[in-house]
Image (cartoon, coloured by chain):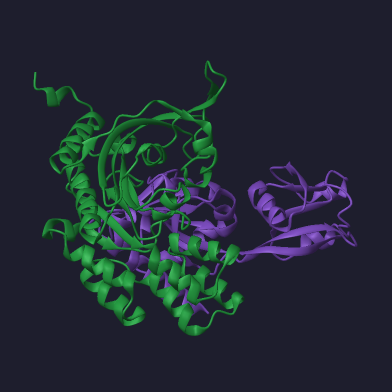
Chain colours: A green, B purple
């Protein structure tokens, strides 16, 4: 019997992804099943779900079954100045998904690139995000956003606190009518309002979106970075990338590119990642960081001939 | 042609909304036949409609069983589904409001008792004001609660205000305007974006004409 025939879609995808990351110079990172609860308590708003399974270990210390991998990797990685660490993992996390009645064990495979990163390294991470999706299904899309552009548009509109949060929700929902109503209520000047609205209305293939962004935002650093990242992709990867500012994420942690990946047949994203220098600073680590995770749990929904 | 799966809310609002879809060029004549069918298809136009309970539309869309659907803003505020909210259809217009017995003043002296079927909306509304509340979750006849002393206020949908007036209740404040919204599954939108955009454009043109 061929080994491929007995592997589930999730197992087959995990093997393909691990091979992909190893071939591209990433080394495996195996972590402990448990972490001190403090790590998660201090960074709760970085987590996808705030609920955590805790227990007291033999020394009386409060521990947690890991709800996340990135926090542990950053915490446990010590870097010398100028050094870059490229790691990949295949781990189980314990979370309460939205609407679920309790905790669920979820498998995720992903990678982190930490330390002295530059545009070339960032482009490498995005290329691997594209290759990861292609390893799951040929019918896939990677939505690429830039929180630098989102933050600067919010700042220019003078939106802070609750209003900024509501504006971000409108961006995430492609809710142009809600955003315009919010801007009107907050007295946002027309030019700033139009820039924010552009972030909702402008999405799609980079070749059409990037010129429109340049028209609206001019010589903007984030737009230039997006263009540089897209131009570093191979044609097959570029074809599957869409610029889209509805990608959700926490502005406190993520600051540069952020992305979500979708495959046809799975009704939620299967890949999520971005640049999270904010988390590095919060955890008092030097350098920058980029990474992504592929969520394998939803892959059973792939059409039979795929996966 | 890729089939577009559309969840519509059962009832008067759904029928009105279907007429808008029809006018936008996404018609499915079999939906107007009198029978017990649950799903209606028009392969020529590439559409498949199904009627669902209004509060379930967002679940069908969020989980991808429907690519798009029409849901009230009240449901979207309460359940916060992870969907795109593409268009305000400007129909089914009403408001989510706080109401109480005529003359009621909240002096803040004790925990405010709030009866509602929109527990999350009520909790978020009062949390933003820093007001301590006790939520009494009800599934219907919310207006009864302050009359019988079960609650101090209610958070509910107010359309004309007639029910409130006839029961000597009054609106204290508006929480949010409510109307029907076109929503889409985020993942399915990526693979059917042209069709969904065409639908949204057709509906937008219709709502603007109606204004």
Q: Is residue A154 above or below residue B111?
A: below
At x 45% / y 67%, what residue is drawn? Answer: A151
- Residue A78 as seen in the image, left or right of residue A178: left
- Residue B191 as seen in the image, left or right of residue B61: left
Single out the residue that lies furthest toward the front: A81
Is residue A306 at least partly visible in the picture? Answer: no
| Residue B48, image x, y percentages | 34, 52
At x 36% / y 61%, what residue is drawn? Answer: A256
Viewport quadrant of the C terminus of chain A: top left
Closer to us: B68 or B39: B68
| Residue A23, image x, y percentages | 13, 40
Closer to us: A31 or A202: A31
Single out the residue that lies furthest toward the left: A1
- Residue A300 as seen in the image, left or right of residue A185: left
Q: In which quarter of the image is residue A135?
A: top left
Single out the residue that lies furthest toward the bottom: A190
Is residue B55 at least partly visible in the picture? Answer: yes
At x 47% / y 43%, what residue is drawn? Answer: A47
At x 35% / y 80%, what residue is drawn? Answer: A216
| Residue A211, image x, y percentages | 25, 77
| Residue B64, image x, y percentages | 37, 46
């Amino acid at each position: 019997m061929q080994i491929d025939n007995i592997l589930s879609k999730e197992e087959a995808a995990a093997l393909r992804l691990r091979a992909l990351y190893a071939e591209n110079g990433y080394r495996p990172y195996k972590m402990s099943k448990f972490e001190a609860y403090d790590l998660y308590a201090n960074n709760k708003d970085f987590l996808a779900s705030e609920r955590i399974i805790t227990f007291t270990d033999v020394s009386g210390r409060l521990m947690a079954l890991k709800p996340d991998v990135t926090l542990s990797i950053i915490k446990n990685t010590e870097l010398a100045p100028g050094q870059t660490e490229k790691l990949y993992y295949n781990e189980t996390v314990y979370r309460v998904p939205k609407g679920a009645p309790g905790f669920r064990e979820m498998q995720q495979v992903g990678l982190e690139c930490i330390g002295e990163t530059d545009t070339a390294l960032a482009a490498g991470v995005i290329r691997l995000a594209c290759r990861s999706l292609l390893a799951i299904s040929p019918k896939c899309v990677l939505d690429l956003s830039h929180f630098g552009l989102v933050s600067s548009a919010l700042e220019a509109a003078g939106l802070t606190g609750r209003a900024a949060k509501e504006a971000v929700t409108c961006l995430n929902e492609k809710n142009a009518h809600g955003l315009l109503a919010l801007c009107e209520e907050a007295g946002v000047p027309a030019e700033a309002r139009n820039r924010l609205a552009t972030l909702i209305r402008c999405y799609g293939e980079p070749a059409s979106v990037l010129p429109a962004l340049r028209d609206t935002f001019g010589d903007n650093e984030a737009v230039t970075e997006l263009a540089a990242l897209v131009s570093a992709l191979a044609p097959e990867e570029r074809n599957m990338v869409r610029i889209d500012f509805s990608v959700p994420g926490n502005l406190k942690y993520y600051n540069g590119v952020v992305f979500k990946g979708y495959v046809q047949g799975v009704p939620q994203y299967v890949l999520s990642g971005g640049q999270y220098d904010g988390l590095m600073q919060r955890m008092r680590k030097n350098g920058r960081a980029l990474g992504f995770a592929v969520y394998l749990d939803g892959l059973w929904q792939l059409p039979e001939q795929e996966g | 042609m890729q089939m577009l799966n559309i969840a519509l809310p059962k009832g008067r609002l759904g029928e009105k909304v279907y007429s808008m879809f029809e006018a936008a060029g996404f018609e499915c004549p079999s939906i107007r036949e009198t029978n017990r069918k649950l799903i209606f298809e028009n392969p020529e136009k590439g559409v498949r409609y199904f009627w669902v309970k209004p509060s379930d539309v967002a679940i069908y869309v969020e989980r991808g069983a429907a690519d798009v659907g029409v849901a009230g803003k009240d449901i979207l505020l309460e359940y916060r589904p992870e969907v795109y909210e593409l268009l305000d259809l400007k129909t089914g217009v009403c408001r989510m409001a706080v109401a109480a017995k005529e003359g009621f003043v909240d002096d803040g002296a004790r925990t405010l008792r709030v009866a509602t079927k929109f527990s999350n909306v009520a909790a978020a509304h009062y949390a933003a004001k820093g007001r301590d509340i006790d939520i009494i979750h009800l599934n219907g006849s919310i207006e009864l609660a302050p009359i019988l002393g079960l609650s101090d206020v209610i958070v509910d949908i107010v359309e004309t205000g007639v029910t409130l007036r006839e029961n000597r209740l009054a609106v204290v404040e508006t929480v949010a305007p409510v109307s029907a919204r076109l929503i889409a599954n985020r993942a399915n939108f990526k693979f059917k974006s042209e069709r969904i955009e065409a639908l949204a454009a057709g509906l937008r043109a219709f709502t603007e004409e109606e204004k």
